Structures are given as structure tokens and as C-alpha cells.
Image: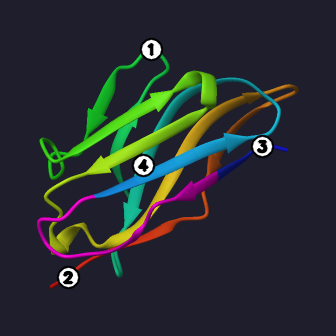
Amino acid sequence: QVQLVESGGGFVQPGGSLRLSCAAQGSIRSINAMGWYRQAPGKQRELVAAIIAIGGTRYADSVKGRFTISRDNAKNTVWLQMNDLKPEDTAVYYCHAEVHGMDRYQELWGQGTLVTVSS
């Protein structure tokens, strides 16, 4: 059984920073893309940033220049460094991964971590 375990959310004032982490745990052969999505109240879940195994990245226009996604393939871990946070970044952030386990391929979601940006 493979699962994604997230950490790092919390409360921060506008202009502040937070770092989210997500570790894939279990019997894993490899992971394709890993990424972060977010869902604000009353809105659809949206892609924030994604990174493939060889390092290529993709960002939502709203976070370009402020957020940085990175990963460690040996640790099956992905991070999201969020700088210059704005109130509109407030949302539940979900980790996502395309995981090749020992016997099957799965698309997995983390449990979600709340990020609140407010003065």
C-alpha cells in the first residue's frame, strides 16, 4: 500500500513564506510526475505546480515567480516553497503523484494541508 503524507501548512501573514512537503511511503518502484493542487472554498481544485522525474516543471500563472517546486527522487519526496504569499493563496493544498508500485500503477492524493494567508 502506497500513500502520500503531507506536512507544512499553517497560518501566515501576507508576504510571508511556507514550505510544504509530501513523501510517498510504501513499496514504490518509481514515480512519474509529482505535483501540488489547491482548492479554495467554493472553487474547483486547480493545479499549482508539477514536476516530472527528470526535473521539468510547470506552474500556474498565478504563482510563477513566487512558488518553487522541487523533488528528491531517492526520497520519493516533493516540496513546494511558497514565498510572498497572498490572501488569494488561501486554500487546502493537495499533493498528487503518479506512482508505479510493485504490482500496479496508481494516481495518489495526499490528505490535504490547509494554508491560510491573512493579516
Q: Where is residue 63 in the image (x, y as percent from the top left)?
A: 18, 50
Q: Position of residue 32 (x, y in %)?
A: 56, 25
Specify few, some or many for label 4: CA neighbours under 10 Å numbering under 14, 14-19, or 20 or more: many
| Magenta stretch: includes residue 15 | yes
Start-end of magenta stretch: 5-17
- Look at discs 3 and 2 and give the one toward the viewer: 2
- Look at discs 2 and 4 and give the one toward the viewer: 2
Specify few, some or many for label 2: CA neighbours under 10 Å numbering under 14, 14-19, or 20 or more: some
Q: Name the residue under label 2.
A: 118
Q: Which comes sooner in the sequence, label 3 or label 2? A: 3
Q: Name the residue under label 4.
A: 36
Q: Which comes sooner in the sequence, label 3 or label 4? A: 3
Q: Which residue is at 80% across, 39% downward?
A: 26
Residue 92 shown left or right of residue 26 in the figure:
left
Residue 27 shown left or right of residue 51 in the figure:
right
Residue contact between numbered discs 3 and 2, judged by CB atoms under 8 Å:
no
Q: Which comes sooner in the sequence, label 2 or label 1? A: 1
Q: Mark 1 points at which residue?
A: 54
Q: How far apart are marks 2 and 4 (CA)?
A: 21 Å
Q: Which residue is at 20% across, 82% downward?
A: 118
Q: Name the residue under label 3.
A: 2
Instruction: Please tell me whether mark 2 sits on a helix, a strand or a loop.
Output: loop
Amino acid at dot 4: Trp
| Magenta stretch: includes residue 70 | no
Q: Which comes sooner in the sequence, label 1 or label 3? A: 3
Specify few, some or many for label 3: CA neighbours under 10 Å numbering under 14, 14-19, or 20 or more: some
Amino acid at dot 1: Ile
